[in-house]
Image: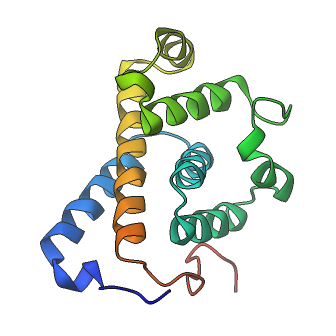
Amino acid sequence: MTQRLNYQTASPDAFKAMIHTEQTVRKSGLEESLLELVKIRASQLNGCAWCLDMHTKDARAEGETEQRLYLIPVWREAPCYSERERAALAWTEAVTQLRDGEVPDAVYTEVRRHFDEKAVTDLTLAIIAINGWNRFNIAFRTTVGNYVSPKAKA
């Protein structure tokens, strides 16, 4: 596939708005490893190759195991995720997919067992942000495979 346009240069203000949202998420206090799992899962659901390439590389650079990365699509059956991570992954799926125009009460109840009001709001913002990045990269066919994680050790 050929990249349609570079949204970063086409609209620097739009790109800055996305970066500002991303910076807000990073300052939220949520664990970086949790945020990477959320970004990977939403990107899988949306079919965003560019974001999957980026976030799996970043997660590996931060010490995430291959097993946990491979098992994200089947996290419900995999014993290697904490209850907090499971709640975040369920919330990610519900907010990303919005089946029948709602997020089920049971998913909300479970995420609230593990996240206070601020944290669940920040987690939701992280999900909104990655869904936005997914849509930019899918719509404009951002070239995949060239991302090098700044977190990777040389």
Q: Is residue 95 shown left or right of residue 132?
A: right
Q: Which residue is drawn at 26% across and 78% down?
A: 7
Classify 13 as above or below 30: below
Classify 45 as above or below 7: above
Classify 132 as above or below 146: above
Q: Is residue 39 shown left or right of residue 57?
A: left
Q: Residue at x 55, y 77 (%)?
A: 150
Q: Residue at x 60, y 25 (%)?
A: 87
Given residues 110 and 25, the one toward you in this image is 110
The image quadrant that residue 142 belongs to is bottom left
Q: Residue at x 56, y 42 (%)?
A: 31
| Residue 3: percent from left, percent from top | 40, 87
Quadrant that contains the C terminus: bottom right
The image quadrant that residue 100 belongs to is top left
| Residue 151: percent from left, percent from top | 60, 72
The image quadrant that residue 125 belongs to is top left
| Residue 26: percent from left, percent from top | 41, 51
Given residues 49 and 63, the one toward you in this image is 49
| Residue 84: percent from left, percent from top | 64, 26
Q: Is residue 32 shown left or right of residue 10?
A: right
Given residues 8 and 33, the one toward you in this image is 8
